[in-house]
Image (cartoon, rainbow, N blue to C red):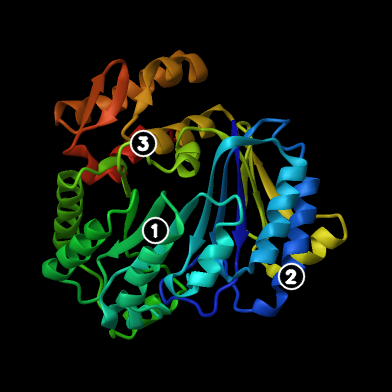
Amino acid sequence: MAGIYLHIPFCKRRCVYCDFFSTTCSEKTSEYVQALCQELKMRKDYLEGEDIETIYLGGGTPSQLSQEELKILFTQIYNIYNVKEEAEITLEANPDDLTSDYINQLRQLPINRLSIGIQTFHEDTLQLLHRRHTGRQAIEAYHRCREAGFHNISIDLMYGLPGETSERWEQDLKQAIELHPEHISAYHLIYEEGTTLWKLKEQHRVEETNEDLSLHFFHTLINTLNEAGYEHYEISNFSLPGFHSRHNSSYWTGKNYVGCGPSAHSFNGTSRQWNIASLDEYMNGISKGAPIFEIEELDLYTRYNDFVITSIRTCWGMPLSFLKSNYGDKLYHYCLRMAKSHMEQGLLEIKDNTLRLTSKGIFVSDGIMSDLLWIE
């Protein structure tokens, strides 16, 4: 089983924190869709005929595409690839794009899962972040999606926002739980160098949340969502039973996937490749039949490091039998040796021959994963 990721880079305007590749050149959507269709055809052998279990349209803002443009993409995918009948097909969307008409148009397509970028329900913070929607619009859009028949909805939240207090974060979580989505992704705001947010910090117009408050927010997130019946299955992801993101989980469990569009990444088990992060250069390369990308062949130690980073971050953990059989005795014993002190501190545990973070260890997961990595 494998996945397809399509990067849709178009945004009406950029959020101040975003460092993903995006563009406001919305007049190029039709030309871009044709380029994606060409790349999908060019890459049809990359997955060596594997069935497609997940399709994910991310961005950017995929909900900037029209129904007709989305229909063209899905027609191409289904013509070229063998998509399983029960495939999970996700579209990322901004709340203000989700009008009744647009939602009904989406219902005519194979899309069966929506990921709605809400971030927060507080108006002043939404304005600071340059989000296009209001808190009320987000709630109304969510309910319209439900009424239209979408039964698998994820919402994105952010914490550690400028000026955020415990009370405001608790209010966001309360509102999210009242909506009762099947899935919630919650990310700590990161001040990425080169973004508008980074510049605001450099100008002392905003201030990063301190570490103690960040940890408090994370504690609150975990406890609140667990009490509401959500499973904490990955560091930043929570779902009701049976509704984990199958596409994102494929990244963490080492499944193959092909990524199309500028800056999109692909993985086939032995190598990674990624397209150029430029809309015009991407489309020009595709039109000439010479896509511009870089590729990295993965040696044993790189694949081991990838395995550590992707497996330890999930509730499923690292299967030690798989570690030993796929990476050999040397890396198996190295991993256990590096994990020993963390197990003694109650940060890692072995159950059913699987190495996992404990409820205590998840708060220092970055440091633990770093210690388990192979360093030449």
Q: Quadrant of residue 174?
A: bottom left
CB atoms at circles 2 and 1 under 8 Å apart?
no
User: How far is the residue under mark 2 from the one under mark 1?
Assistant: 29 Å
CB atoms at circles 2 and 3 under 8 Å apart?
no
Horizontal and vertical percent position of residue 235 = 31, 45
Mark nearest the camera among 2 and 3 is: 3
Does 262 sit above or below residue 202? above
Marks counted in the figure total: 3
Report the residue marked by disc 1: 146
Looking at this view, name the residue that lies furthest to the right: 288
Report the residue marked by disc 2: 30
- Residue, x 40% and y 18% (percent of image)? 332
The numbered mark, 2 or 3, whose residue comes first in the sequence reads 2
Q: At label 2, which amino acid type do we have?
A: Ser
Q: Is residue 78 left or right of residue 55?
A: right
Horizontal and vertical percent position of residue 277 = 64, 63
Q: Quadrant of residue 120?
A: bottom left
Horizontal and vertical percent position of residue 44 = 76, 41
Q: Is residue 280 left or right of residue 86?
A: right
Mark nearest the camera among 3 and 1 is: 1
Q: At label 1, which amino acid type do we have?
A: Arg
> Closer to the camera, 195 or 98?
98
User: How far is the residue under mark 2 from the one under mark 3?
Assistant: 36 Å
As drawn, the label of residue 242 is: 3
Mark 1 crowdedness (10 Å alpha carbons): few <14, some 14-19, many ≥20: some
Q: Is residue 111 left or right of residue 129?
A: right
Horizontal and vertical percent position of residue 2 = 60, 35
Q: Quadrant of residue 196?
A: bottom left
- Residue, x 25% and y 71% (percent of image)? 208
